[in-house]
Amino acid sequence: MAASSNCKESQLRFAGSAAIIGGFLMGANWIWQGYLDLTPGADAILHDTSHFAYYLNNLMLLVSSWLLLHGLFAFRNQDPSAGGGLWKLGFFLSAFGLGLFGLGAAGFLFHGLIGFGALLDFINISTGIGSIAIHLGALPLGYAILYHTSTPRYSSLLLILQTPIVIVYLFGLVPLNPLLAGILIGGMYGGAWIIIGSYLRRYV
């Protein structure tokens, strides 16, 4: 019984650390891309398979997606008070988005290493859909955390506030400085997961 309890505690600590690191990597990637977008043509290195930045970018996205998925599932299993349709919708969209986004990042890595040209359109589409699902899912997930869980409310507010900024920025509804958008979106989404990860570690 003690061994089982210790195993669960270590898994929860790992999940908390995964959420913290994943949130940091995802947020840092948004900020990095925003910085590169400031200079016309600078973001071309992220699409150049001969450049180190291409692999670093996609590796960051792959690792952060996997770590955040781990944190998301642990968070769902750990807090039974989180319920209702909003939670289920937010969880589904977030899990679906992170999974699809991670697969897309892995596809880009394989494309750079061994050539995946025939599937490049599919990889682009899956990554795009995954990204939209992640940030749309943050809205119901944030509301569910706000009203149904004991997680610090700062995390829910960050998740809720980042969604309209993503919509405004990605669809070009309002001109927004790329670096500012990266800081706001990356800081809010990544920051929310860092708070959730810290909560999971304290839950042990």
Image (cartoon, helix red, strand yellow):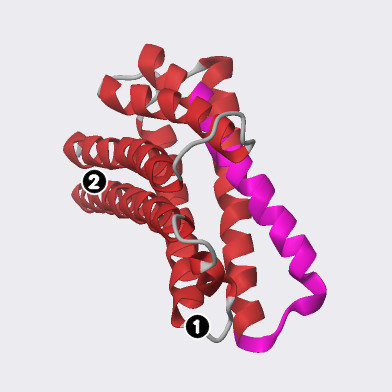
How crowded pointer 2 is (Cα within 10 Å; few <14, some 14-19, many 20+) is rated as few
Where is residue 14 drawn, in percent x and y? 28, 54
For the record, the magenta segment spans: 113-140
Location of residue 90 in the rendering, given as x and y in whole percent from the top left corner: 54, 28
Q: Residue furthest right?
A: 118
Queried whether the magenta region covers residue 118, the answer comes back as yes
Amino acid type shown at disc 1 = His
Query: In the image, what residue occupies the spot 30% across and 39% down?
Result: 191
Q: Position of residue 86 (x, y in %)?
A: 55, 18
Which residue is depicted at the point 70% across and 84% down? 115
- Mark number for residue 51? 1
The residue that mark 2 highlights is: 5
Q: Which three-letter amino acid code belongs to the residue tagged 2?
A: Ser
By secondary structure, the bulk of the magenta-drawn segment is best described as helix
Helix or strand or loop: what does disc 1 sit on?
Answer: loop
* Residue 60 visible to an observer of this rendering: yes
